Image (cartoon, grey):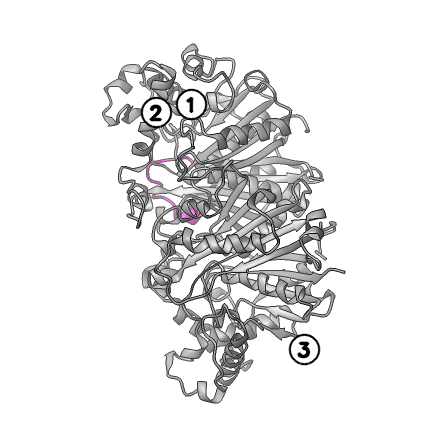
Amino acid sequence: MAERCAVIGVGQTHHKAKRDDVSIAGLVREAAKMALADADLTWSDIDAVVIGKAPDMFEGNMMPEIYLAPALGAVGKPMFRVHTAGSVGGSTALVAAHLVSSGIHKRVLTVAYEKQSDSDAMWALSVPQPFAAPLLAGAGGYFAPHIRAYMRRSGAPDYIGRMVAVKDRKNAMRNPYAHLHLADIDMKMVEDSMMLWDPLRYLEACPSSDGAAAMVLAAEDAVSGNYPPAWVHGMAMRSEPTMFAGRDQINPQAGRDCSADVYRQAGVTNPREQFDCAEVYVPFSWYEPMWLENLGFCDLGDGWKLTESGATAFDGDIPWNASGGVLSSNPIGASGMLRFLEVAMQVRGQAGEHQVDGAKLALGQAYGGGSQFFSMWVVGSAKP
Amino acid sequence: MSAAARAVRPVSIASFAQSQNVRKDDERNEVEGLMPVIAEVFGNIGITKDDVDFICSGSTDYLIGGPFSFVMALDAVGVWPPRSESHVEMDGAWALYEAWVLLQEGEIDAALVYSFGRSSLGDLSEILTLQLDPYYEAPMWPDIVSLSALQARALIDSGKATEADFAAVASRSRRDALSNPKSQVANDIAPEVLLQDDYVVAPLRRHTLPPITDGAAAVVLAAGDKATAWSDRPVWITGFDHRIETHSLGARDLTTSPSTAKAAEVAGVAAGKVDVAEIHAPFAHQELILAEALGLDDSVAINPSGGALAANPLMSAGLIRIGEAAERIRSGAADRAVAHATSGPCLQQNLVCVLEGGA
């Protein structure tokens, strides 16, 4: 029988294009120390450390948990490294949560990061592989055709993507840690930005960020900290094959199955009504309407209508990415954990200017690869 | 039993399979290399992928030289409909640990664990340098053989071992490997003859180094009714822990392995007689350090498979230790075994798994 698990501390760096004021160790330590302070704990209170990041080639440091053990106070403790593509920040939090819910540890520190300025993610994504189609253009080039297919399938008008881009950047103005603070953002500014991968314009894509996220997870009898705990109500991962003609990359089965699993665990039957907010991995603007449908917040084909209606805006009935989301900060390996962390902040009431009033139950989602890897959790202010 | 005040849910190593370990497998890609191993690990016990509830794998992108090497490898399993699945950028022994943690919660009863890697694709010694501190150590490009030589030298200087002891480990390991059909390097050469080898990096002679190996391995874990249904003699994991040390080599006593000793304590190695130990010691001298840290005496059969000196497929060599130890118990040759895996330069990170035969 699984034990209850709660988020009792959160920390994140100021995300920037280049954090050349810190090493990789300094970056992860900055987020970890903040999470420990929030939990009112010190390094010695932690039983184990779980770290995650996207491909090691993004920094050129192989299996970096080996180098980062002392920086994260892990010497003499179990230290675990997760890597599940773009969903890794979420998966890392889930592995850490299972160490608590299995009863093995009382307090686990989990950290995720990327220091993109130490290398070049676009290069690292584009290394030619035998017998595989080259990805040369990076993630945006991979996803643009899926977005066009979504537009054709749903009949969505072309300005929906721009609406998401504006909404998330306006939200980021309320988040002091966000990488992008574009005070003058509006539809015209997005429309005037250069076309990268049709139909995605520059301002409809995520930035490249340096940054880290950290959380302290605890068992029920080890709860401490400055804010009430965020209880984990459900957690799930799903993967589907890369090379399978039966995949629907616009509305992936793995995403639907993963959400069905966490909703079942959390007792959620109507996500739009029961969740107070959600942090969902939207690295390119159009993924908001696509994931609205995939996550069951509306019927198939209606995602763009929800976005257009303002329902997902900060003052809408179901705010998505009140933090500004991946479109405003993208330290790749940490981006998924930031989603999980931000919903914990919301239900703990510690989100400051981007706090959604009275948030009690929220969904965090991360995806990765070519939309074949998903990780999700549901957190709430009440005990499950 | 774990030192933690917690009832450990019995989980069994229900099946184990490994590829033929070879110097260079350049006729198959990672998926093609894995597929027969996955088929065998299921086929051993007559199950399919639909009988496992969770999948976890271990690999590193730095062997294939491209990002997301695990993504395509998953096609060797065929995850349609979608499956609950995770990956660690660590040896498969840690992937097995993640699956074991999930099984502890009692929500699921079976998991597939696999790992793979072709060490032949690049210059392994240089690649492993990238595990070091990227600002202060890696730019000097100390290679893994030289770092291990520093450790061996420290061991000799401490008076705990001699070069003849290293040769004895290598001689015994590769002689034992003669009875392991999956091994890569197996021979019967006396230690005195081995000591005539030239130094690669003093005090390490050629025979003290692991081979460079391409290979893959897989394990099925089972709990509850599945554990007893899938095996006449379940092999239970009765203790499991892993620990890490600092990356700074100058801050460590390289002649000891405190992280192994701590993991062994938490896993409860000393709680009973150990019949067999499968130790992941890529360099001969490291077996001596690890045997001491694990508290093993002369009565323990160490590395009857030949160990990492007979085949060292990076990312799988640790998982294979668990599989080999489990097979000794399943065959009745042992009742209680210890399996060990390591990661990082000079044994920085270590995992210890205690296995016991069921009634």
Determine the chain carrying the residue at label 1.
A
Chief secondary structure of the magenta span? loop
Q: Nearer the viewer, residue B139 or A43?
A: B139
Please identify the quarter of the rendering in which residue B266 is found: bottom right
State whether residue A375 appears in this view. Answer: yes
Considering the image in quadrants, where does the N terminus of chain A appear? Answer: top right
Q: Is residue B170 left or right of residue A189?
A: right
Q: Are marks 1 and 2 in contact (CB under 8 Å)?
A: yes
Question: Could you tell me which residue is drawn at 40 percent across and 22 percent down?
Answer: A168
The boundaries of the magenta stretch are A13-26
State whether residue A67 appears in this view. Answer: no
Which residue position is annotated with label 3? Answer: B299
Which residue position is annotated with label 1? Answer: A290
Give the x, y percent position of residue B156: 50, 80
- Is disc 2 placed on a helix, strand or loop? helix
Which residue position is annotated with label 2? Answer: A147
Q: Is residue A93 above or below residue B177?
A: above
The answer as to whether the residues below labels 1 and 3 share one chain is: no
Q: Which mark is residue B18?
A: none
Question: Could you tell me which residue is drawn at 41 percent across and 27 percent down?
Answer: A282
Give the x, y percent position of residue B322: 59, 61
Kind of residue sitting beneath label 3: Ser
Considering the image in quadrants, where does the C terminus of chain A appear? Answer: top right
Determine the chain carrying the residue at label 2.
A
